[in-house]
Amino acid sequence: MRTLGRKSFASFLCASLDVARWVLIVLLAVMVFVGIPAYVIDAYVDLSWVTSPPPGVVLWPGMMLFIISLLVALVVVSRLRRIFTTLIDGDPFVPENATHLRVIWMTLVAYEILRMVVTSGAIMTLHLSGAMTQMSGLRGGLSINGGLWLAVAVLVVLAEIFREGARLRDEQKLTI
């Protein structure tokens, strides 16, 4: 099986990214139109089937982080899909691909910093309110996702490789 061009592995991955994009859109719609209203209704109505719901200081940030992570995933999948489109066309070293990779790593960095701040803030609030002793499974401290930071470093390098490749390709087109 070929890796680039029509009916290649790149076109299979592009189609898979299309499916992933639609799944993310559906999940996002469910969270916005069902998840948030259900939590708001739950705040005002006693639902007896919920035995021990987590406190709002954990649930709201968790729900918002989940929605933001869906949006981040949607950005990443959409940008990757655009990159794979150029792979299918057989012209990967275009300046737009470097921009797409740059947007992906910047989005991941912003999300990870937001995640660290929000989760640390929620845990600190639980400690201060005394609810931390009642919650099991939560631990304090700053959690750093080493795999994500490694992926960001790789994406930074790949963005520069694609930028340089596009520059060399444009330079080569000008030579006689």
Image: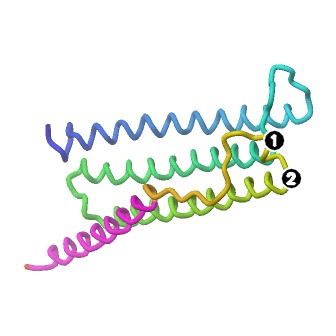
Query: Residue 156: which quarter of the image?
Result: bottom left
Please name whichever residue, 57 or 93, is drawn nearer the observer in this view of the structure. Answer: 57
SS for callout 1 = loop
Q: Which residues are magenta?
A: 149-175
Please name whichever residue, 92 or 150, is drawn nearer the observer in this view of the structure. Answer: 150
- Select label 1 or label 2 by which is in front: 2
- The label shown at residue 47 is none
Residue pictured at 67% horizontal, 55% vertical: 140
In this rendering, the answer to whether 46 lies above or below 4 is: above
- In the rendered structure, are the residues bearing label 1 and label 2 in contact, judged by CB atoms less than 8 Å apart? yes
In this rendering, the answer to whether 115 lies above or below 163 is: above
How much space separates mark 1 and mark 2, taking CA atoms? 11 Å
Amino acid type, label 1:
Pro
- The label shown at residue 55 is 1
Q: Position of residue 165 (x, y in %)?
A: 23, 70
Is 39 situated left or right of 84 in this image?
right
Amino acid type, label 2:
Ser
Question: Within the magenta stretch, is there residue 165?
Answer: yes
Specify the quadrant that holds the C terminus: bottom left
Residue pictured at 54% horizontal, 59% vertical: 144
Q: Position of residue 160 (x, y in %)?
A: 32, 71
> Residue extending furthest top?
49
What residue is pinned by disc 2? 129
